[in-house]
Amino acid sequence: MGTENGHNAIVSIRGLRKTYDGKPPVRAVDGIDLDVHPGEIYGLLGPNGAGKTTTISICTTRALPTAGSVVIDNIDVVKHPSAARRSIGVVPQYNTLDRSCTIWENIHFHCLFFGFSRAEARARTQQLLDQFHLAEKANSYPAQLSGGLAQRVQIARAIAHRPKVLFLDEPSAGLDPQSRIAMWEIVQGLHREGITVVLTTHYMEEADELCNRLAIVDHGRILVEDTPAALKNSVGAQTIYELDLHEPVPDLQQKLGMLSGVTAVEDTPRGIRVLARTCDGLIGDIVSTAQSSGLRDMRVTEPTLETVFIRLTGRDLRE
Ligand SMILES: Nc1ncnc2c1ncn2[C@@H]1O[C@H](COP(=O)(O)OP(=O)(O)OP(=O)(O)O)[C@@H](O)[C@H]1O
Ligand SMILES: [Mg+2]
């Protein structure tokens, strides 16, 4: 990877590191390089503590890096934080609406802060309330809103000054499934309008559904980066059989590996994983081969981003 910042990128991160002091020090971000293209929805997918929030905090001028650079819309965010903030919208991991202000005021004050005239700020606030179906809640206070509605207000506020890049840190954490889908539709709508979106998530379904490209991050580093489809294809199988076994059986791996259509057999903490090209007729062969070896349970799945993560780290995203 080069050290020059990417020419066509709207977000360009090079050699990014962040170490938190302490005993021992925590290397939260440990050498991240990435480019986000204009108009893309780009995801950082990773487990708790992977360094996602720290990366977003540096990109959005909330934290300073220990080393490395972030250039957004041709502005170095570390050297020129106030200028960079005009190009950036942020929805942080935790609700940061002002609890003492109404929904209308939360958006209106944001517009004023970014230099809108009073008339412009009023018009923009009204337009956003209409666009996000929040007009009825204009005079409500944040504490009166459901998690889904509060998240919608946070997104409306984040884009009020028309930033080029919207950062969403764990946008669906704590949302019920219906609100999560509504949030996805909002993000897809903004994407169609041309805004660039960078989001973090530890939900593989969310990364898969929303992102044009994503990086899987763990321990402050990028393990892989690609489109969701390419990452799933990289597993090299159409069907995956997860076998739970009572105890390890020495020659079972080898026997399963000889079945026709099987492309790989791997140890897992609970037993064995069989990767196969197709699902035709294989299940019977697998069960009969494994049954004498104390087969406890079996799950049949297709490769998901979770599979990609597990194969890279040996761990579950949710652990
Ligand atoms: N202010 C801080 N001081 C010390 N350590 C920190 C601080 N903020 C984060 N960390 C540590 O840095 C690492 C990365 O944390 P970060 O919040 O960036 O991860 P994350 O991927 O956003 O995780 P999560 O899924 O929990 O939101 C973790 O080990 C965390 O404990
Ligand atoms: Mg986080």
Image (spheres, rainbow, N blue to C red):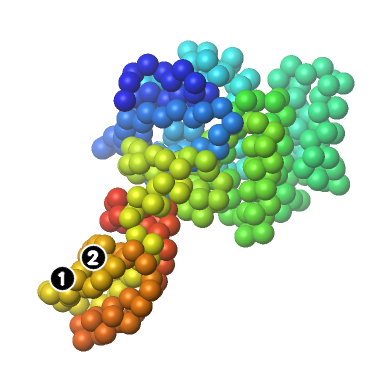
* Residue 29 in the image, given as x and y percentages of width and height: 36, 33
Instruction: Kindly tell me whether residue 113 is visible in this rendering.
Output: yes
Q: Amino acid at mark 2?
A: Val
Q: Which mark is residue 66?
A: none
Whether label 2 touches label 1, CB < 8 Å = yes
Going by the numbered disc 1, the residue's amino acid type is Gln
Instruction: Specify the quadrant of the image occupied by residue 246.
Output: bottom left
Label 1 Cα crowd, 10 Å radius (few <14 / some 14-19 / many 20+): few
Would you name the residue on which mark 1 appears? Answer: 254
Query: Residue at 52% across / 15% down in the picture?
Result: 74
The residue located at (32%, 65%) in the rendering is 276
- In the image, residue 77 above or below residue 21: above
The answer for how far apart the CA atoms under marks 2 and 1 are is 8 Å
In this view, 5 is above or below 195: above
> Which residue corresponds to mark 2?
265
Tell which circle, 2 or 1, labels the residue nearer the N-terminal end.
1
Q: Position of residue 186 (x, y in %)?
A: 68, 44
Name the foreground residue: 289 vs 215: 289
Q: Residue at x 39, y 39 (%)?
A: 225
> Is label 1 in a helix, a strand or a loop?
helix
